[in-house]
Image: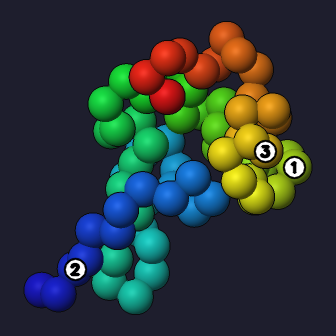
Amino acid sequence: MGIQVVPPDINRSHARFFPGGDNSILYGLNAIKKVGAKTAEAIQEERASNGQFSDIYDFTARLDSHALNKGV
């Protein structure tokens, strides 16, 4: 079939698995160990509202600490 599962990408992945185009599937953030539904949705909403994350510091600064846990 030629379908490729693309590793999770903080700037492209959705909360759930999602078609990535070109016969690919984007790995869902919710499927990552210790990333719950609320965290995955918060990441997706923040990215939709304020654009892509530039680095890990931008990521942690923009997300509410309650959305993140030690595992994330």
Foreground: disc 1 or disc 3:
3
The percent position of residue 7, horizontal first and vertical second, equals 35, 62
Query: Circle 2 sits in a helix, a strand or a loop, which is it?
Result: loop
* Label 1 with label 2: CB-CB less than 8 Å: no
| Residue at (71% x, 16% y) in the render | 65
| Residue at (22% x, 80% y) in the render | 3
Q: Which residue is mark 1?
A: 50
Q: Which mark sits nearer the N-terminus, 1 or 3?
A: 1
Q: Is residue 1 above or below residue 47?
A: below
Question: Residue 66 lies in what quarter of the image?
Answer: top right
The percent position of residue 72, horizontal first and vertical second, equals 49, 28
User: In this image, 36 relative to 51: left or right?
Assistant: left
Residue 1 appears in the rendering:
yes
Q: Which residue is mark 2?
A: 3
Foreground: disc 3 or disc 2:
3
Amino acid type shown at disc 3: Asp
Q: Which mark sits nearer the N-terminus, 3 or 2?
A: 2
Q: Is residue 29 above or below residue 72?
A: below
Q: Which residue is mark 3?
A: 58
